[in-house]
Amino acid sequence: MKAIVLKAFGGPEQLQLEEVPTPRIGAGEVLVKVQAAGVCHHDLLHRAGQLPGAHAGVVLGHEVAGEVVEVGAGVLQLAVGARVVVYQRRFCGQCRDCLRGRQDLCRALGLPSVDTEGAYAQYLRVPAISAIELPDGLDYTQAALASCPIATSVRALYGEAALKPGETVLINGASGGLGAHQIQLARALGARVIAVTGSADKVDSLKALGADEVVVSSAGYSAQVWKLTAKRGVDVAMENLGHTLEETLRSMTQGGRVVVLGNVEPGSVAVAPGLLIGRRLQVQGSGSATLEEVRVALALIRGGQVKPLIDRVLPFQQAAEAHALLESRQVSGRIVLSGW
Ligand SMILES: [Zn+2]
Ligand SMILES: [Zn+2]
């Protein structure tokens, strides 16, 4: 089969088209013909050699939608021809967390392209429990975004933060892949959205997505949030950046819930214990999603409440170009690879 192989850590030119053996499935597995694969920031880190534990000589990609073309022994719930999206990690399906529906907490979580084959290829072998059937009428390019950027936001916003209608939510990094989908998820629930972005030219597009107010700031936004909420603060915050946590904590109301799901500039941040105590704040980490939350994401896409933000669709041969575009920040939303 054709695949885009990462020849060595380095620039986009290291992504090269090669002929590699088509995977052979075993019991409990299915072979998926990849119809669409999202290009994630994670793939850029891997390519550049900045992902701990990652190797070169592999195929990247973990945001996959496709068609089941072969079914292994013992697979009862999927048949050849099924249209599926693939859960973004590998989980064991047998541990205590998996069995209580928290696949995002499984200790055996493996990442496609790091621990297994990746998706910039014609075919992908996956455990049948990782393949989730698509609702009718949902196309592959849209579905490819369900697992990574959208379901991760479903987990953080609906799961960890348990956002409710009528609450106010702060979303920073608002024009990124997480933030832009969180705005839509929050609006679908009837919450008020205050979006924070670093660039003034994103204001209109964020309002079009459903933000009630947009604060343009790369650093200090808590004073403006304070004004917008009549000195009450926000009920919930999505900390998509990490290094801005201090500002986010200052933007919270009494009993506010902060979910940290981004770490754009890895390092440490100052946290004032007095602020946590005085405002009775909850700070919660979040990452990935449960299988059920991927289904929720698919249902919301199907229902039109969330529109996957796709910058453009390119053939797999142009994976290197997709990486270069994403790296130079000329992209709004995801680039999806589809077709050869
Ligand atoms: Zn991703
Ligand atoms: Zn498990």
Image (cartoon, grey):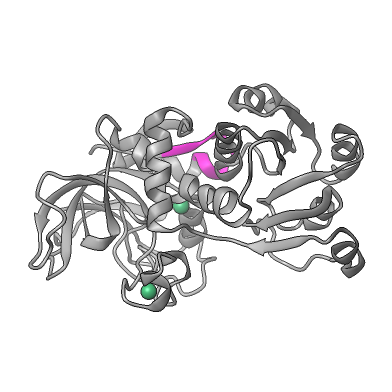
In reply to whether residue 138 is colored magenta, the answer given is: no
Q: What is the x, y in percent for residue 230? A: 90, 34
The residue depicted at 40 percent of the width and 50 percent of the height is 294
* 110 over 138 or under it: above or below: below
The quadrant in which residue 297 appears is top left
| Residue 320 visible within the image | no
Percent x, y of residue 332: 55, 33
Q: Is residue 224 visible?
A: yes
Is the residue 240 above or below the residue 209 in the image?
below
Q: Position of residue 159 (x, y in %)?
A: 55, 54
Q: Residue furthest front?
A: 165
In the displayed structure image, the side of residue 173 where residue 223 appears, left or right: right
* Quarter of image, ligand 2: bottom left
Left or right for 173, reference 228: left
From the top left corner, tell me how far across and down residue 13 is, in percent. Answer: 41, 51
- Residue drawn 39% across and 54% down? 292
Q: Name the one closer to the observer, 279 or 37.
A: 279
Extent of the magenta region:
325-335
